[in-house]
Structures are given as structure tokens and as C-alpha cells.
Image (spheres, coloured by chain):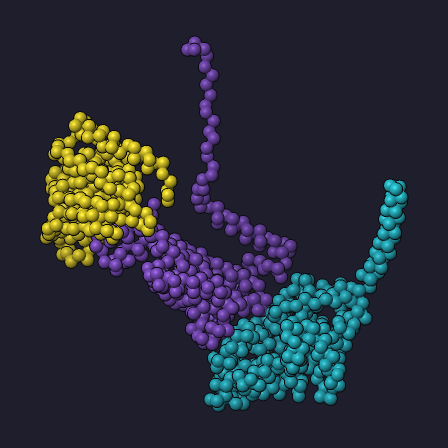
Chain colours: A purple, B yellow, C cyan
Amino acid sequence: MADEPERAQPVKFRGGGFVSKPRRFVAPLVFAVLIAIWEWGARAGWISPLVLPAPSEAFEAFKDLVESGQLLRHLSASLQRLIVGFTAGTTLGLTVGTFIGLFSIARSGLAPLVAAIFPIPKIALLPLFIIWFGIGEGSKVATILFGSFFPTVIATYSGIDNVDRGLIRMGQSFNLTYRDIVRKIVLPAALPAILSGMRISASISIILLVAAEMIGAEYGIGAYVLLAGNLMATDQLIAGVAMLSILGLTVNWLINLAERRFLKWRA
Amino acid sequence: MDLKVQGLSHRYDDLEVLRGIDLTIRQGEIVSVIGPSGCGKSTLLRLIGGLERPTEGEVLQVGEPPADSLNPLTYVFQDFALLPWRTVKGNVSLVLESKGLAQAETDARIADVLARTRLTDFADAIPKQLSGGMKQRVAIARALSVNPAVLLMDEPLSALDSQTRELLMDDLIQLWAREPFTSCYVTHNLNEAVRLGHKVVVLSRRPGVIREIVTIDTPVPKRSISDPALAEIQQSLWEMMREEAMTADMELADG
Amino acid sequence: MSIQRFTRVRGLVAVGAIAATVVGFAGLTAASAAEKVVLGALRFTSHAAGFIALDKGYFADEGLDVSFEFFQAAQPIAVAVASGDVDFGVAGVTGGLMNLAEKDAVRLVAGVLHEKKGVDGMMIMASNKAYEEGLDTVPEIKGHSMAMTQVGSTFHYMTSRVAEKEGFTIDDVKLVPLQKVGSMIAALKSGQVDAMIMVPHIAKSLVNNGDAKELGWLYDYAEYQISALFTSVKNIEERRPMVEGFIRAYAKGIADFNRVMLAADADPAEKEEMTKIIHKYVYNDRPYEKAAPSIQAGAMNLNEGAALNKTDVAAQMQWFQDQGLVQSKLDVDKLVDDSFVKNY
């Protein structure tokens, strides 16, 4: 056997693929190419301005907005509503969600109620909101509050449901007080679920911004988009929608930051 | 302080888990509890520490726990039960917080138990950075920090690989040698039971009753892997359990 | 037997083929005679002229096979006409419509709804709360809040006309855009806004139910062109005879409507017959007895002969341009094609 010439060949590589690696430059490139095609199509005339205005026209509309100083008013009006509504909705949602997660009575009483109200499109309730909360900031904030409240409640109590019971038993075995077990074990353990719930409720809040600003809003990105739609000013419409999209991306980025900051400990 | 288990029986609905357990754990003594899987070992441990209420019988503390004991009955869990978001130090301090200790004393206690478990250099690491053995040492440090009267250990080494298990067993033996602690040590591993236990309690399969209590006289720090006397005891324990272990293995869950 | 069956089958096939050919020819001629036209409409009494023209066969007389596409709001009709999904639409002369005209998509070709002194039209009304606090005449609106659907809507424009006539400007009232008529009603009923202008059938029922107070009628301030018939520029250029025929038939519908629904001395039987025609499309989710009063309450003056008040349309356009809601380069001749009906 030793004197027979051995045929040697490298073993063929068969693994690889099926692994997603981050490619940083791809996303901006896709955006750039799409916008370039869109612009070129609009200039060449095979995308009618009626169907879709050129990106440059939308940008022009955006520039007008900046130069007229209206951008700041729209942005600050919308951000104020978003922040107040989202903060209040999230705080209330965390509280109610924690109660549902911890107490059987709260769960039996409130969980079905939350499940029943969550799917109602808040936009359908606008006329009622006007009567309940008025046409001022109240109803706008309330719309966003309702939108962010329910997902937070559900995320919080399902997060609490999924907390490792072993950790709670550990806390009890060391005679930690009920309050400490909730504060130091249950809530931190539910935080990943709560944060992913916040990601959803933040997006819902931005979606509802337009609905909220249907009610007597003079300023706000939602109001700007609505007006553009009513006037068939498609360039302004695209500019407004792009702003909403950027707002969404920003919020998403902030939540990523929060996750990186607070959830480092996750494997 | 001694612990006395008297006429303890337990059932979950129709399922009888433990029947008529009588057992005394004396101060400074390690009592190993072994038995086939599903015999109620862990339930017994939860009953002893007051995490569950027995259907019948009672568990008595005889004598006073040491004055500086913050949590007389303290557990060490199989899955470590560390808070993944807290550092090693933070996990220990969790059980000392809001116990009315001065900051200086808390710090001193933490430093002491980390030194005893050789974790001082890892005080600021978080659990996901640690190996399984280190995690369990953190859990042991946490348990020691409250000066327990009795350590209730629920298969503390079962989640570890065999080399790590040996290392940790040595650690436990050293800890005990330096400062003898009282413990109820539940395990399914006969070797651990024999190496650590002053007494080995053998439970039958469900419903668990005490089949035998074997006393081992060799001092714990002097026992070694190759001790023929220990091997013999281990062998006889295995003979005792073998049949039941087989039957238990063939049982369907929720039978 | 098999041969017998074979012949019979073959015979049937032959007869069938001949029949198919005949029917096919008939279908072909019918299709070439009746041109398919789609009218975008709302289920409002103000759109009734189209329903009447169809029911009475005026469209068919012009060789048009008209069908309706119903919408929830006027704005989407304009978009549908621009995209070619619908051939004609009736909508208020709004900023949105003007901007579509500026993009060379649609043009106004005939008048439909026009305020006329003495004929119930848009009502100016106050909330009960504001009324009790002293808002009981139209000029006192100055300084109060008013609901409207949108910036650039007919409500927006109407308010400006009232303000102009009473010697103040639109900046003297606080206009609240609420997007939907339902929201406007909710806001007025609950006293969140002090006043609004509303279509007659809704306004009258609000007043009759005690939910709001009447202040006056818009026709005392502006006899103006509220809504118009429009079509796509493509239709005007490529299907001119069809557009002409459609407008002729629509004008006949208008004539019938004005004669029967608006005249005080109209024949009750004829009025009922016409209300029944309209009821096929408007409030058809309610029984006739309940729907009839609402339908009749919604009757407003339609442009006789479908004539279009181009002068007023130009004035409206100017106002929208002054407000910065419509591009200032839009010319009235791009908005209105005056070659179809009498313009004044």
C-alpha cells in the first residue's frame, strides 16, 4: 500500500452561505439607485408628474418649507405631540401592564378589555375624541396616547409572563421584599420585551400622527401631509411623507441605542 | 442550629410525591439526598426551605440561627439563578441590599465572599462572560454572603461538565474545611453524594420514602477520588438504586 | 343510432354558430352605438341630475352607456378622473381640483351647483353654546372659531366670502380644519367650535333636532358656483362628441330636477316619482318614507342648462392663488373649458 502512488486531492468546501453578514454600503446604495432611476424617469417623461413628482421637486418643496421657516413650526408641533402622547401612553401602559402581569385580578379584569380595545382603529373614534378631548392638543395627544398605550400594556405583561420563574424563586429564597423582587428582578427581566414593544408603539405613534393632526391642526407634519393631499400638491406630499419616514428611522435608531445601552447583558 | 423534618408528606393533586419523611440535619453536617429521577428530591428541598407548603408534617428549626445570619435557609440552584444584567458584585449585593446593612459592611461582606470563592478579579464581569463553573461560584458566593445557617443545594453541579464539577467539588470541600457549614445537598450523582455527605439519604422512587440513611465516617476533607472505601459505598448505593432507576426511566411523564 | 346522434349534434352546432354570429353582430352594433362612460358620483341629492338623466334615458338618447362609480368624498373623484378610471366627476371648485387642472389633467366643462337667493343652500350656523353666549347673527362670527373640512376646501372659501361681505377678513375667524363632515358636526354639537357652514339637509336636521342654531344663508353673501362637472383633458381632446352629448343629457337632468324639486308649486306626484328615482342612489339604506324628507331637504339650485359661472370660478381661483394654495401660474382658461356650455 505504501508503494502504490496515492491520489491526493483537497476536500471540496461545501459549507458557507446561509449566514447574514452586515453590508453597510448596500442600503444607501439601493436608496441612491432607486432615487436616481425615479429622478431620471421623471425627467425623461415616462413618469408623469401626476403619478409621481420627481425627487428633485419634492426636495424643492422641502427647501421652500425650510426657507419659509415653517419646517420648524411643523416639526416642533408634531414632536411635542409625539413626545407627550408617547411618554404618557408608555408610562400608563407600563403601569397597567405591570399590574396585569403581577396580579391575577387585574389580569382577569383588564387583559380581555385591552384585547378588545387594542384592534379598534383609533381613527374611527376621531369624532368621539373631539367630544371627549376637544379640538385642541387634548385629542391629538390622546390619539397618540391610545396608540402607544395598548401595545405597551401587552408587551409589558407578556414580558413579565416570560420572566424566568427561577429568578423570582431565587429572590424569594433570599427573603427579598415583594417590592424589590418586582423592581430588581421582574421589571429588568421584562425590559427586552418592553423595549421591543416600544419599537412597535413608537411606529404606531408616528402612523397615528397623521390621524391625530386631522383634528383641527394648523401645524404639524401630519397636517402638512393632509393639506398637500387635499390640494393635490404631490411634491409637498412626497416631502412630508419622507419627513415621516425619517422621523420613523430616527426613533428606530434611538431605540437601537437604548437596547445597546440597557441590554448589553443579553447573550 | 439543626433542622428537623417530621412526618413530611406532599402531594400535587392526585400525585403523591413524598411520604412520611423524617430527617435531622445537624449543625456543621452535610446531608446528601439521592434518589432516582422524579423521586421528589427537589420538592423535599423546597419544602425544607419554605418555598412550598407541605401537605402533611412540618420542618422545624431547632435552636437559634447565628446572630449575623441574614437568611438562615439559603439556596444554591442548579441553574445558578444569576441576574444576567448585574455584575458578579451586583449579584451578590442584590441579596444584601435593603437588609439594613451599612455600606461599609456590605462592601466587606462582598469582598470576603468573592475572595473565598476566588472571584475577586471578576467582580465587575457580567454572567454572560463567565463559564458555567464561575457562574455557580458566584451563586455560592451570593449564598455565603448572607451567612446562612443551612445551605440548601439543589443539584448545584449538574449543569456543569465533569472537569468543572471536580474543581467545584474541591472548592466546596475547601470552603467547608475552612468554615464548616450545614447543608442539605440534593443530587442524582452518587459520587458527589459520597464525596460531600456526612450522611447519604437514599429516597425511593415516587412516592419518595427514605429507604436508607448511610453514614460515612471518613472526614470530608480527607476523601479522594480513588478512596476504595468510598468506591465501595458508592457501589452499594448504586445496587440499591439500580432497579428503581431503571423503572423510573421507563415511566411516562404525567403517568 | 350513433349516426343519428351525430347528425343531430352537428345540426345543433350549426344552428348555434348562426345564432352566435347574429347575436355577435347585434352586440357589435349595440356596442358601437352606446359608448361606455363612467360618472364618478357621491350619494348626495346634489348629484341627482346624473341619476335622473340615466333613469329617464337622456344618456341613452345621446348614445351613451353611462354607469356610476360611487365615492365617499369628492377629492378622490378628481384623482380618478385625472387617472382615467372615471370619465366625469362632480366636485366643489377646490384647491385640489385647481392644482390637477394646473397639471393639465382635468378641466371644468359645466356648472352644477350654484347658490341662488331664496333657494335653500349652504346654511351658516352656530353651536348652541355660542348662540347662548350671544353669537346670534352672522356678522358676530368675527373673532369666533369655525369648523371646516380642510384648508383649500369650499368651506374655507365660503367663510372668506362671508367675512369679506361683513367687512372683516378670514384672519379674524379661527378656522379649524377637521377633515371630515362627521368631525365638524361632532365639534359643533359639543360646542368645541362656535360656528360652521353646512350643506342644507344636514344643517336643517341639526337645527330641527335642537343640536345647533341657524344664523343665516350663504346666498345672502355669495351667489357662487359651488360645484362643477369636470372631465379629463384627454376626453376633451379625443372624445369631444361624447363629452358634448354627456353634458346635453346632464343638462336635461338638471332641468327636470330644478323644475320638480325646487319649485314651490311642483306636482306632488311628479316630486314623489323623482324622489324615488333619487332614492335608488341616495339614502338607499333607509326605507323610502324615512329617506324622502332628507333627500328633499338636500335639494339645492342646479345651474340651468349646466351653464358655468366662469367669472366666479375665476374669482375663486384668484382667491386660492392669493392664499398661496394654488400655483399662481394657473390661468382660468386652463381650469375652465368654456366651449361646451354657456359661460357667464
In the displayed structure, B38 sits above or below C301; it is above
Picture quadrant of residue C164 = bottom right
Determine if residue B203 is in view: yes
- Residue B25 position in % (x across, y down): 15, 44
Image point (73%, 82%), residue name: C271
Determine if residue C108 is in view: no
In the displayed structure, C184 sits above or below C66; it is below
In the displayed structure, A208 sits above or below B175; it is below
Image point (65%, 76%), residue name: C287
In the image shown, does B21 or C341 lie closer to the viewer?
Answer: B21
In the image shown, does A256 or C43 lie closer to the viewer?
Answer: C43
Judge left or right: residue C12 versus residue C236.
right
Image point (37%, 58%), residue name: A157
Number of marks drawn: 0
In the displayed structure, C243 sits above or below C160; it is above
Picture quadrant of residue C88 = bottom right
